[in-house]
Image: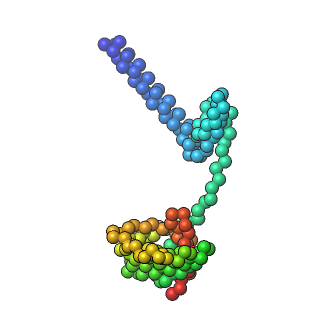
């Protein structure tokens, strides 16, 4: 019986030691991971590696990560109501009519004189404008009008907003408009 207790105590001690060791390692790794640092190093075979934990024997260098910090954009839904108009650098025009009741009409004349037009309902969440269209029409020189049959959801992100103007981004394209009325 004593031998059984001794084995149980030995296992318990080992388990406590393992749990303590894992806890200690996690506590030490936490700050390094929180810093979000990335390192680069080259192994003996000349292969370049990137990671957050270089091998101990490697001569690693911290990678400087640069990016554009996006400023927070506050959008006031009540200030969206009205007719907005803008001209693109490429010669196209955009007219957006946003109504308080949730209706939206969007017309874009492209430089080749083709027209992209839809109407639908809009919803604003943070800086994302979601539109469910009732229809989309596209027409161009000699192509006639094409009309969608089923509703489509479109998503735009506000990258700038003031009561007089705003910029929307969709599929990498910016749409800049100013309030007409």
Which residue is outermost to the front? Answer: 142
Viewer-side residue, 160 vs 84? 84
**Left or right: residue 57 compared with residue 33:** right
Viewer-side residue, 59 vs 141? 141
Quarter of the figure that contains the N terminus: top left
Which residue is outermost to the bottom? Answer: 181
User: Vertical placement of 157 versus 94: above or below?
Assistant: above
Residue 161 in sight in this render: no
Q: Residue placed at 66% from the left, 31% from the top?
A: 46
Picture coordinates of residue 113 (x, y %)? 53, 77
Picture coordinates of residue 40 (x, y %)? 64, 39
Number of residue marks: 0
Q: Residue placed at 51% from the left, 37% from the top?
A: 26
User: Vertical placement of 84 versus 174: above or below?
Assistant: below
Picture coordinates of residue 80 (x, y %)? 48, 78
**Left or right: residue 8 compared with residue 59:** left
Q: Residue placed at 52% from the left, 34% from the top?
A: 24
The answer to which quarter of the image holds residue 133 is bottom left
Viewer-side residue, 50 vs 149? 149
Residue 95 in sight in this render: yes
Q: What colour scheme does the image use?
A: rainbow
The answer to which quarter of the image holds residue 32 is top right
Viewer-side residue, 36 vs 66? 66
Picture coordinates of residue 72 (x, y %)? 56, 66
Which residue is outermost to the left? Answer: 1
Q: Residue placed at 50% from the left, 73% from the top?
A: 75
**Left or right: residue 18 compared with residue 7:** right
């Amino acid at each position: 019986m004593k031998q059984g207790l001794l084995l149980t105590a030995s296992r318990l001690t080992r388990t406590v030691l393992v749990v303590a060791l894992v806890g200690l390692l996690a506590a030490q790794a936490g700050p390094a991971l929180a810093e979000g640092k990335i390192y680069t190093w080259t192994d003996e075979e000349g292969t370049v590696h990137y990671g957050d934990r270089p091998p101990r024997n490697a001569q690693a260098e911290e990678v400087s990560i640069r990016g554009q910090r996006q400023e927070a954009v506050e959008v006031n839904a009540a200030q969206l109501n009205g007719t907005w108009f803008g001209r693109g650098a490429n010669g196209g025009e955009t007219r957006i009519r946003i109504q308080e009741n949730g209706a939206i009409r969007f017309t874009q004349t492209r430089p080749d004189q083709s027209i992209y037009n839809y109407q639908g309902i809009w919803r604003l969440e943070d800086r994302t404008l979601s539109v469910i269209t009732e229809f989309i029409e596209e027409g161009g020189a000699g192509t006639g009008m094409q009309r969608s049959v089923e509703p489509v959801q479109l998503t735009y992100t506000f990258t700038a907003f003031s009561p007089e103007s705003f910029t929307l981004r969709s599929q990498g394209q910016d749409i800049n408009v100013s309030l007409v009325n």
